[in-house]
Image: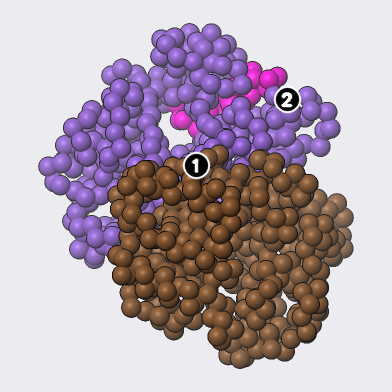
Chain colours: A purple, B brown
Amino acid sequence: MRDFTFHTPTKIFFGKGKEANVGEIIKGYGFKKIMLQYGMGSIKKSGLYTTVMTSLKENGIDIVEMGGVEPNPKYDFINRAIKLANEENVELILAVGGGSVIDSAKFTAIGASSSLDVFDVAMGKVSTDKALPVATVLTISAAGSEMSASAVLTNTELGIKKGTGGDYIRPLFSILNPELTYSVSRYQTACGISDIMAHTMERYFYPVDDTPLTDRIAEGLLKSVVEAGRIVMTEPHNYDARATIMWASSLSHNNLTGCGRENALAVHQLEHALSGMFDHIAHGAGLAVLFPAWCRYVCGKNIKRFAQFARGVFDVKEENDEIAAILGIEALENFFKEIGMPQRLREFGIENKAEELAELCTMKRTRTIKSYVEIDADVAKDIFNCCY
Amino acid sequence: MRDFTFHTPTKIFFGKGKEANVGEIIKGYGFKKIMLQYGMGSIKKSGLYTTVMTSLKENGIDIVEMGGVEPNPKYDFINRAIKLANEENVELILAVGGGSVIDSAKFTAIGASSSLDVFDVAMGKVSTDKALPVATVLTISAAGSEMSASAVLTNTELGIKKGTGGDYIRPLFSILNPELTYSVSRYQTACGISDIMAHTMERYFYPVDDTPLTDRIAEGLLKSVVEAGRIVMTEPHNYDARATIMWASSLSHNNLTGCGRENALAVHQLEHALSGMFDHIAHGAGLAVLFPAWCRYVCGKNIKRFAQFARGVFDVKEENDEIAAILGIEALENFFKEIGMPQRLREFGIENKAEELAELCTMKRTRTIKSYVEIDADVAKDIFNCCY
């Protein structure tokens, strides 16, 4: 087991109707003026906006609104939010939405705490450990940003999607009500499931051994998500299944499944290039195509690990490790297919841009990505080609 | 899944040699004067005391020493520590030791933040949410106090061992170096394993269903502890096995395995009466005797759950649930036996005090304890008799 630091101070309020307490919770922390960020208006249709606003107002919280966060939050939008947050001296950024809204809130919180350019922060050109507090009311189980130390933004002009990380951007608190995800479409639910599984598998398949406790937590999480995922495909209002997926979302990316391991988020790096270049590709859908392809590409380097995955997650009974490993990857691919995820990049209606994507994710061949097989531009190109 | 609040802000520094950073970490938080609590001197023999003191002094931290915490920390000692902490205006209590030292530090932290009597707090007569910050350097994997919201003290005069709980007493940070547990005796290691398993099983066997994710995390934790427990019995210096047990210690009682469930710590309530009355009984050893007896007493109320436990933790292959449930409890009992735990209360060299113990744990028949079978004084007496 590798040395690790584990710090997840985000307070989780989990359960039915908890969003109605948001104002009281914020007041309890002593904040008086906040910025409310949300997406393209679905929270207005669902009534969540009214619930949140009512709770905030009843508790005397001043609200600066900044709706309109797009999927894959944009650098431009974030800069406008930072400007407004500074002008209005807000004390906390409240994100009501999914991963994009939360990531937008996190970058706003970073930008409003210093004069740094948040794209420079994302590109790793400058570093910081200061951010306003962020809180969330989660509406989509997927990114895990509600409890994670990371955030991603997209610079549309440059076609670059990049992330940053650090405990300083973990939310102060997050409200998780599984009922709020009842209305998430079948497709978006499946994208979320792919993302949750990918967060877990990225850590599970990092080249470190001897972490049986962390492994079993990861396998249990994956197995539970597969089971619940099958249920919500036909029963979108199944509370317990939605709850399992929602809690798994948070645990999959708060680094519990990475304790004693490490985490290069290898397949995420490939996918960020993809959805950075093609804005219409949902992150989870991209991951669902790329992950099995990556597994096939690298599994020869640690057959035992992939066999363990097959048995621990998909109950593969095969005793031969090599066969079990392949069966496990097939089971993963079949599960993604079953929940309606694409199998090939061509299904997104795009040209094969393997070469350009490979350049992008290796930052013009200036870096490689750690995985069982070190990913340089040539390897990345192979993987993108394999799944085109 | 039941609603829950989950808040584990304790920062974990896990790995080899991390205790040498304790002064730097404390300095990083800005504390200048601390109280150092430790036990009966084993940290002086092992050299840990010197390491910690050197690190504190090098970082300019003023130290008020309060060594001599006994197993099952005593009300008297804690009161002396509170007095000293107040006189010296210490800002943080650093516990270097196991659960008893940490619990002593927690009660000292409570007492030094108000004029409340900490025994009244433990008895639930008064409540508070204020405590000085506590930090820990853990030397025994067992109580989980290094990341938990609870603490227990013993009033020797009244023969009462009682606990209190709340997020406000979760440690600020804990340093977990598995190497520090190499020197823990075989017996104490086994007691710790029993305690860790009991913390997990108490939650796992609380009468709530529909928490598959939490269940699988619990099963994975138990299975990993059983596996690692067998290893350390013959290889006390096996780093990975010690690391698994140490990390399981923290996760077993930080409430991760209770999310969406509840937790009456039923068997703990029985055991606290036992080791409150008989100071020579190690908490973990008491639990190892009581837990299988409690399981047998209540398992008829939820055979399916005990069958799931048998299959998930001990790989019982039996398809009939009733038989599997019994085989699981037997496997648990056999495991405790295998690691050198007693099977019967008489092995502690005590008289059968079932009647008195039953009165004690139900506070003279004024309360019952929630479990599959509600535990009143008569039930408690039955269980104590069963395992005498």
Residue drawn at (56%, 63%) of the image: B40
Residue A16 in view in this figure: no
Q: Which residue is mark 1?
A: B18
Q: Quadrant of the N terminus of chain A?
A: top right
Residue B43 figure quarter: bottom right
Neighbour tally class for label 2: few under 14, some 14-19, many 20 plus, Cα within 10 Å? some
Left or right, A283 with respect to A100, comes to right
Q: Position of residue A235 (x, y in %)?
A: 58, 51
Magenta stretch prevailing secondary structure:
helix
Q: Secondary structure at mark 2?
A: helix
Q: Amino acid at mark 1?
A: Lys
Q: Position of residue A127 (x, y in %)?
A: 30, 29
Whether residue B56 appears in magenta in the rendering, the answer is no
Neighbour tally class for label 1: few under 14, some 14-19, many 20 plus, Cα within 10 Å? some
Give the label on residue B265, or none. Answer: none
Residue A253 in view in this figure: yes
| Magenta-colored span | A281-301
Q: Which residue is mark 2?
A: A303
Q: Chain of mark 1?
A: B
Residue drawn at (64%, 18%) of the image: A297
Q: Position of residue B61 (x, y in %)?
A: 34, 51
Q: Amino acid at mark 2?
A: Ile
Left or right, B359 with respect to A281, comes to right
Q: Chain of mark 2?
A: A
Q: Nearer the viewer, residue B238 or B79?
A: B79
Up-down relation of residue A361 to residue B39 (above or below): above
Q: Nearer the viewer, residue A320 or A140?
A: A320
Q: Residue furthest left?
A: A87
Q: Position of residue B11 (x, y in %)?
A: 44, 49
Q: Are marks 2 and 1 in contact (CB under 8 Å)?
A: no
Looking at the rendered structure, whether the residues under marks 2 and 1 are on a common chain is answered as no
Residue A106 figure quarter: top left
